[in-house]
Image: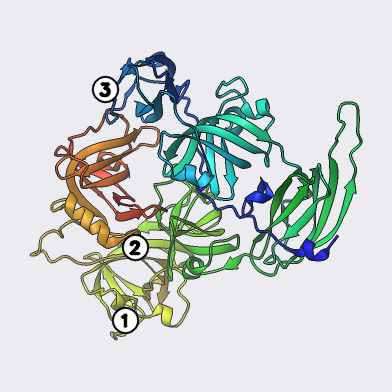
């Protein structure tokens, strides 16, 4: 075999991806996301077809609670729906249309509690247009397309529902629901059609968009072309830091297997290949041959890294390619937050130690939080073991994970909660003064700055200062920007840089020590500070419930802040203009507020808690038209397509509801 061919390399970014050679160079149209079928609200068909001559089509609605057609849905004059609401259990929903000269469509939603199901209605003969994946992604929702692509990976509930991703040379799209050979949905279509990764399928289905991602819904399979080569197994999908041998076993029906590896993977080297011919039998006249291909993996002196090896096969008239991806473990890089944020997205593992500043309430699993050290702050998204550790805001923790990103915002992903380094106890100054000296026990203490001079009465750059509670005084030996500030410039200038003055409130994290009879809080970690307010100035507009923003002012503030919160808690007063969901399971609600009760100029309140920052316990606790004051952090949320939405996002709750507070 030509070694130059062996060393030619083709990149692939997915774990196991099969595609025809004509499909090399895939460009993803949508990111991977998970969505499960909801047992609390199901329909027998999400696409309803009515003949052009007019008539009625029935579907079955299965709901765990009362359901109804969403009030925002527009039902056209030519369509009659009965009933438009029902009780828990199974209901027959009828769609009746008058005769149509051409094709026409309608879209509506039915809701049951916080559960939503979208239904598309099509009448008449629709022209099924064969298109590329990209053209389908860019096409109009509700339109039916015929698309051909290779199955590149399975989605959630693949076995029963046929959910998968297909790709051609233009992109990738999800198949969300697939009919079996009898035309029945939710009936194990993969087994019915005998589908495997790498098979090239032609499907027809209506295009829809879910959370900004394109999908073809409840498709019909038109044609299946089996792949000539598939991976049977590998001896490992993770190689150790010391390197070793990777062996991949394949089955193929063609003129041999050609392995290729991209030039960027200089640490992966082809070794050899053994081929075993298939034995023909009465049952299988054309059996597959098998190949075992081995590669040498060099030791890894850096962080985790991944590679993809492709295998192609041709029978003279057709060609197929499959690829196997794996990870090699590497050293874990100890890094300050700033270095982690500056790193590229990849498989390298980083270890970060810092203070938990806030829990991320956008994670229903409760495994996400923000971590801060002297150099910056980062979101840790779903660190395994965090919730179980009992760690809380203010604690000093260590986590290990990869540099990831969501909508171009950096975050730690695939993380593991490694260590609760210090469980920090919140105490008063008086309580702190009574504690024994102990460098291994950390406390959080808040007080008002009474002096910015050190114990010798001198000005200083290190933040040596005094705090008071009005009665007791505590000496702070060093006030730095965050945990772990190394000696030198990193420990200087924090007070001056933030305009902190006598009279401001300061919260410190540190341990108790005594030097020459003077009790000190040492460690230098500033958790938070608050500027003193001039009593003659009154409340700061937008930062106090007594002087909340209008919604228009909150929108402007979001635009000024941008996609990353400035950490300030703001208040805004308005009327609820629409409600996306109220979840008693998660205890939060997502809704819009505006100045006039319309959705023309609004702020989205994302996963807001109820009055008193308590969980929502009643789905009917709020309604459109209610007057509220909402508080929380403001951002101008930007999705991956660049669309911007002003939001309360982070520590959000309803401060006042129709004048009532708790």
- Picture layout, residue 52 above or below residue 367: above
- Residue indicated by mark 1: 454
Query: Residue at (90%, 45%) from the top-left corner?
Result: 276
Q: Quadrant of the N terminus?
A: bottom right
Q: Quadrant of the C terminus?
A: top left
Which comes before the other along the chain, label 1 or label 3?
A: 3
Tag 3 secondary structure: loop
Q: Which mark lies nearer to you, 2 or 3?
A: 3
Tag 1 secondary structure: loop
- Residue indicated by mark 2: 445
Q: Which mark lies nearer to you, 1 or 3?
A: 3
Please name whichever residue, 536 or 136, is drawn nearer the observer in this view of the structure: 136
- Residue indicated by mark 3: 77
Query: Residue at (66%, 33%) from the top-left corner?
Result: 224
- Picture layout, residue 637 above or below residue 164: below
Q: Position of residue 256 (x, y in %)?
A: 83, 49
Q: Position of residue 608 (x, y in %)?
A: 31, 43
């Amino acid at each position: 075999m030509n070694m130059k061919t062996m060393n030619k390399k083709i990149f692939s970014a997915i774990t196991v991806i099969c595609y025809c050679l004509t499909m090399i160079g895939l460009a993803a149209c949508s990111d991977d996301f998970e969505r499960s079928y909801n047992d609390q609200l199901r329909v027998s068909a999400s696409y309803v077809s009515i003949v052009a001559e007019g008539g009625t089509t029935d579907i079955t609605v299965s709901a765990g609670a009362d359901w109804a057609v969403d009030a925002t849905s527009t039902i056209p004059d030519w369509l009659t729906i009965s009933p438009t609401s029902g009780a828990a259990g199974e209901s027959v929903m009828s769609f009746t249309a008058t005769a149509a000269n051409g094709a026409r469509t309608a879209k509506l939603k039915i809701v049951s509690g916080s559960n939503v199901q979208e239904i598309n209605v099509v009448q008449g003969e629709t022209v099924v247009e064969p298109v590329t994946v990209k053209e389908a992604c860019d096409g109009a929702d509700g339109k039916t397309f015929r698309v051909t692509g290779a199955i590149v990976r399975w989605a959630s509930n693949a076995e029963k529902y046929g959910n998968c991703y297909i790709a051609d040379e233009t992109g990738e799209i999800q198949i969300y629901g697939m009919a079996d050979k009898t035309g029945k949905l939710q009936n194990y279509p993969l087994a019915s059609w005998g589908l495997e990764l790498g098979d090239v399928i032609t499907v027809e289905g209506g295009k829809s968009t879910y959370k900004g991602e394109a999908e073809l819904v409840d498709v019909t399979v038109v044609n299946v072309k089996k792949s000539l080569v598939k991976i049977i197994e590998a001896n490992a999908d993770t190689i150790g830091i010391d390197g070793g041998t990777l062996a991949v076993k394949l089955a193929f029906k063609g003129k041999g297997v050609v392995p290729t590896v991209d030039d960027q993977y200089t640490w992966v080297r082809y070794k050899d290949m053994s081929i075993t011919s298939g034995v023909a039998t009465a049952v299988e006249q054309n059996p597959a041959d098998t190949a075992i291909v081995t590669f040498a993996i060099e030791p890894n002196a850096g962080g985790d890294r991944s590679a993809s090896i492709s295998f192609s096969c041709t029978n003279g008239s057709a060609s197929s390619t499959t690829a196997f991806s794996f990870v090699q473990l590497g050293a874990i890089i100890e890094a300050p937050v700033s270095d982690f944020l500056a790193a590229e997205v990849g498989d390298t593992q980083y270890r970060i130690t810092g203070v938990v500043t806030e829990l991320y309430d956008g994670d229903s699993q409760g495994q996400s939080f923000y971590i801060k050290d002297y150099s910056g702050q980062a979101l840790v998204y779903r660190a395994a073991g965090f919730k179980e550790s009992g760690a809380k805001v203010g604690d000093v923790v260590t986590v290990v994970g990869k540099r990831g990103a969501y909508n171009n915002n950096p975050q730690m992903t695939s993380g593991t909660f490694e260590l609760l380094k210090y469980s920090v106890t919140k105490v008063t100054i008086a309580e702190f003064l009574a504690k024994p000296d102990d460098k291994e026990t950390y406390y959080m203490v808040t007080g008002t700055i009474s002096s910015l001079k050190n114990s010798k009465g001198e000005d200083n750059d290190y933040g040596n200062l005094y705090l008071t509670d009005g009665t007791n005084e505590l000496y702070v030996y060093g006030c730095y920007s965050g945990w772990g500030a190394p000696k030198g410039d990193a420990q200087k200038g924090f007070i001056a840089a933030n305009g902190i003055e006598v009279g401001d409130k300061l919260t410190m994290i540190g341990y108790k020590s005594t030097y020459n009879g003077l009790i000190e809080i040492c460690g230098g970690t500033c958790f938070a500070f608050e500027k003193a307010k001039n009593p003659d100035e009154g409340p700061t507009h937008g930062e106090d419930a007594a002087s909340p923003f209008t919604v228009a002012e909150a929108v402007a503030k979001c635009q000024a802040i941008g996609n990353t919160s400035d950490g300030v808690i703001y208040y805004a007063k308005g009327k609820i203009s629409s409600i996306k969901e109220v979840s008693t399971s998660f205890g939060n609600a997502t809704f819009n507020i505006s100045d006039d009760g319309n959705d023309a100029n609004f702020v989205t309140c994302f996963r807001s808690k109820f009055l008193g920052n308590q969980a929502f316990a009643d789905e009917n606790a709020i309604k459109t038209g209610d007057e509220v004051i909402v508080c929380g952090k403001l951002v101008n949320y930007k999705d991956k397509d660049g669309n911007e939405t002003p939001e309360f996002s982070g520590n959000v709750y309803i401060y006042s509801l129709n004048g009532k507070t708790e």
